[in-house]
Amino acid sequence: MILRFSHFGHAVKSIDEVLPVYKKLWGLKPSTRTEFPEDGAINALLPVGQNYIELLQPTSQQSSLAKFINQRGEGMYHLSWVVDDVDKEIKSLRSKGVQVAETPPQTNLITKRGWIHPRSTMGLLIELVDEKLLTHLGHLPKKEPQPGSQVVAWTHVHHVVKNIDQALAMYDRLWGLKAIKRATTPLQGVKNAIVRIGKMNYIELLEPTDPKGLIAKFIEKRGEGLRSFCFTVDNFKSAITSLKKKGVELYEASDAPGDFQIKSAWISPKYTRGLLVEICEHRELLAWQDPELKL
């Protein structure tokens, strides 16, 4: 059973070059740095609300991480989900025809992990971990934003798919997850569906409705999978002003017609080492997601 998001991975060529970007734009600093020799990688964890962003740098050109960067460039690499029992989750998924690999305990990793192949999940590489491993690594949820940062949380990721109904059927079949909200955004040429993971996080599914739109072009170029994620801030106007003063150009979609009537802005990947970042106001976004959610 899925309990919550843990983090997403940001594949980078150099952690030391990327950390100043997170500090400059959002005031985020790493809590830990760890080497994983068997994976051919080192990481740095950036606490963001109840979750993390994991910066991942390859130490071996034969690693899957290095091959990803060489083929696709820096950017979003994977999602990590906390489950109640990794072995049971792997067994359940395999019984449903899902391709899952296992990595045994290794240096700096005391428990088994599971890895769901993107072929089974419409382009998502998903890591399965348990609370024991996260506690060992010090990956514990934080209740307050980092001092000096306006970022409250990263609330969700955007999963781009060719057919939103087929994607929802997949989430339901594998994990019993259903859409809590559906919407359309004609100006952006997409259909949206919200699938909650835990209490405060969710996946936003995006299906293109405009064959010439950005989402359709993304699928044509890169296929289905992770496209972007959302930072929420305590004050939208203040955060946007601050980013502009730092030289960041933003596309503000606050007045876009459709069902998605909340203020938002987008930061180009050229400022963030391959990440397309959405900015929303925390309380407004969560209230839109679920009006009955107690904030």
Image (cartoon, rainbow, N blue to C red):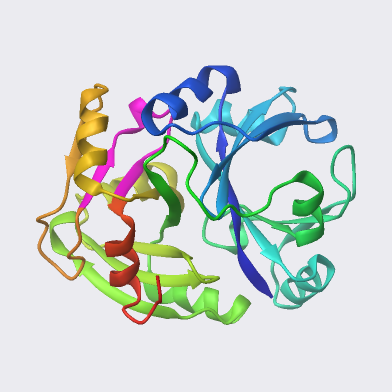
Position of residue 224 measured from the top left corner of the image (x, y, whole percent)? 45, 54
Query: Percent x, y for residue 40?
Result: 77, 29
**Would you say residue 269 sits in the magenta stretch?**
yes
Q: In the figure, 208 relative to 139: above or below?
A: below
Left or right: residue 92 compared with residue 231: right
Q: Is residue 78 visible?
A: no
Q: Along the horizontal axis of the image, is 82 left or right of 272?
A: right
| Residue 160 in the image, given as x and y percentages of width and height | 40, 57
State the image quarter where residue 132 is shown: bottom right
Asked if residue 204 shows in the view, the reply is yes
Task: Name the residue at 64% across, 70% down.
Answer: 3
Q: In the picture, residue 267 is in which quadrant?
A: top left
| Residue at point 40%, 24% (across, down) | 24
Q: Quadrant of residue 26?
A: top left
| Part of the protein shown in magenta | 264-279
Q: Nearer the viewer, residue 292 or 112?
A: 292
